[in-house]
Image (cartoon, coloured by chain):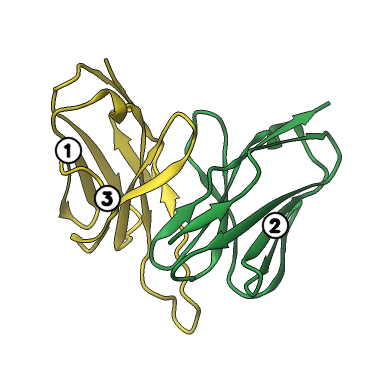
Amino acid sequence: DTAVSQTPKYLVTQMGNDKSIKCEQNLGHDTMYWYKQDSKKFLKIMFSYNNKELIINETVPNRFSPKSPDKAHLNLHINSLELGDSAVYFCASSPGGRPPGGVGYNEQFFGPGTRLTVL
Amino acid sequence: GQNIDQPTEMTATEGAIVQINCTYQTSGFNGLFWYQQHAGEAPTFLSYNVLDGLEEKGRFSSFLSRSKGYSYLLLKELQMKDSASYLCAAGANNLFFGTGTRLTVIP
């Protein structure tokens, strides 16, 4: 019954390698996100996709490339990993749009996180 | 620009009441969220305010003043399990998070 799932949970790799993190949501949401949480616990938006289309790219190096094969999946591929990429990466999803008759409400549901360590 | 400010750390006693403040400046506003994050876990939704005033949900309440760009999260009858980081987030389609307030509940 996992709502938002990510794999792997832990990823340890060498500098310069290329790696991918996968995310899937079974909530039927239209919007998915990738966040990076660094050692100081600051949670920062990286990308946002709505129905497979990129809508937000927050000054992330182009070594990071998100891919959304369908609206239930948003994968994150990272090329030429650097030490500073070590962090926990969270995937999230939200319904997107506005509820009928209501003000916009964008509660986000987070995946369990992927702890990436670059050596 | 976007700016979300909240205290870094707070300590409170079991059974007490604690108020965690948040001030925000965002280019769009579609509501203010509070999330709870236990160490090593994902953030989980606590509350949402879009209109001014107080929203109460059990032991937790959240307040919003849009004119002041200010919110607080009020936790009553503190329990040890409430020790966690509390993240304030605001924005429109895109949420911007504060750095979180790490709350430690002591016996």
Q: Position of residue A72 (x, y in %)?
A: 24, 53
Q: Residue at x 43, y 51 (%)?
A: A109
Q: Position of residue B42 (x, y in %)?
A: 47, 38
- In the figure, what tint was chain B given? green
Which one is nearer the viewer's eye here, A53 or B72? B72
Q: Are marks 2 and 3 in contact (CB under 8 Å)?
A: no
- Give me the residue at 59% from left, 51% from top: B5
Estimate how packed mark 3 is, as few (under 14), some (14 to 19) or many (20 or more) residues with alpha carbons within 10 Å. few
Residue A59: image tag: 3
Label 1 amino acid? His
Question: Disc 1 marks which residue?
Answer: A77
Say the numbered circle drawn on residue B72: 2
Instruction: Report how far apart the C-alphas of labels 1 and 3 lie in the structure.
Output: 16 Å
Callout 3: chain: A
- Horizontal side of A17 relative to A3 (left or right) equals left
Seen at 19% across and 27% down, the residue is A81
Q: Chain of mark 1?
A: A
Coordinates of residue B87 in the picture (x, y in percent): 57, 47
User: How would you rate the neighbour count of disc 2 (Cα within 10 Å): few for under 14, some for 14-19, many for 20 or more?
Assistant: many
Cα–Cα span, label 2 and label 1 = 37 Å
Q: Which chain is yellow?
A: A
